[in-house]
Image (cartoon, rainbow, N blue to C red):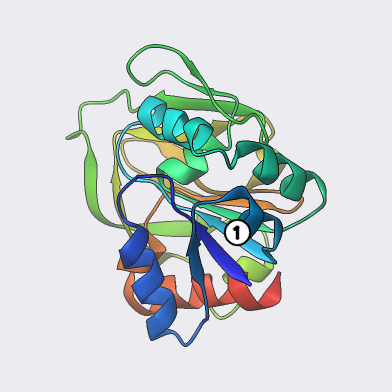
Amino acid sequence: MNVIIDYNVGNLHNLKNALDYGGIESKLVSHADDVKKADRILLPGVGAFAPAMDHLKHSGMLEALHEKVQSGTPMLGVCVGAQLLMDNSEEDGFHDGLGWIQGKVKRFSHELKIPQIGWNSVTQQKKNLLFKDVSDEMHFYFVHSYHLEPANSDQVLGITNYGYDFASVVCKDNLWGVQFHPEKSQNAGLQLLKNFCTLT
């Protein structure tokens, strides 16, 4: 079962609708017992890091998520969901994340408009099942002011340039994170979601 973690953040139904459109069965879950039954987990997120982290903690699902991640269950974090996988974020102060992928979440530091809103390309750094049938330099839809800064460059699958290069796709073992919104990225995004839900 592909489960989408429902912890009172936005974008849940857009993600569910994208999976439905692609013929991929999924279920919105908000209880630990349902998390424990998951074959794959999608962690969405729209908004700010700290409130999202608080909602996740207060949902009662955090311990079950830890257990599933440690047991090897595949997880895909989307946008803020990807940022939560990191050690910490500097958004609105300093806040601890889940710490499942070592690194930080940093605010863009350049003269371009912040947040980045719109289409941008992803340059693939290495082959990965997430990129099956997804062309290199394919464009995806971004909405964010902060970005992933992994400690280990070997865990960067894709980079995007907005003022400077940043990690837009990361992977560590059974964890993947994408800074963009695949559910808003037309065919390329649907293919990426299908890859996660069928190949992991």
| Relative horizontal placement of residue 182, taking residue 3 as reference (left or right) | left
Q: Quadrant of residue 197 in the image?
A: bottom right
Q: Examine the rendering and report whether any part of residue 51 can be seen.
A: yes
Q: Which residue is mark 1?
A: 41
Which corner quadrant holds the N terminus?
bottom right
Residue shown at the point (44%, 39%) measured from the top left: 165
Q: Does 20 appear above or below 79?
A: below
Residue 43 image offset from top left, x and y in percent:
51, 51
Left or right, 116 with reference to 97? left
Residue 110 lies, in percent from the top left, at: 27, 25
Label 1: few (<14), some (14–19) or many (≥20) C-alpha neighbours in 10 Å = many
Assign the C terminus to one quadrant of the image. bottom right
Q: Would residue 24 appear left or right of 67 to someone viewing this image?
A: left
Residue lying at the far top of the rendered structure? 93
> In the image, residue 148 lies at what x, y percent?
49, 35
Residue at the extreme left: 113
Q: Is residue 196 above or below residue 114?
A: below
Number of marks in picture? 1
State whether residue 197 is above or below residue 89.
below
| Three-letter amino acid code of the residue under disc 1 | Ile
Q: Secondary structure at mark 1?
A: strand
> With 170 as the anchor, is 47 left or right in this view?
left
Q: Give percent across and percent down for residue 39.
A: 70, 67
Tell which of 93 and 26 is nearer to you.
26
State whether residue 64 is above or below residue 84. Answer: below
Of residue 47 and residue 59, the one placed in the foreground of this image is: 59
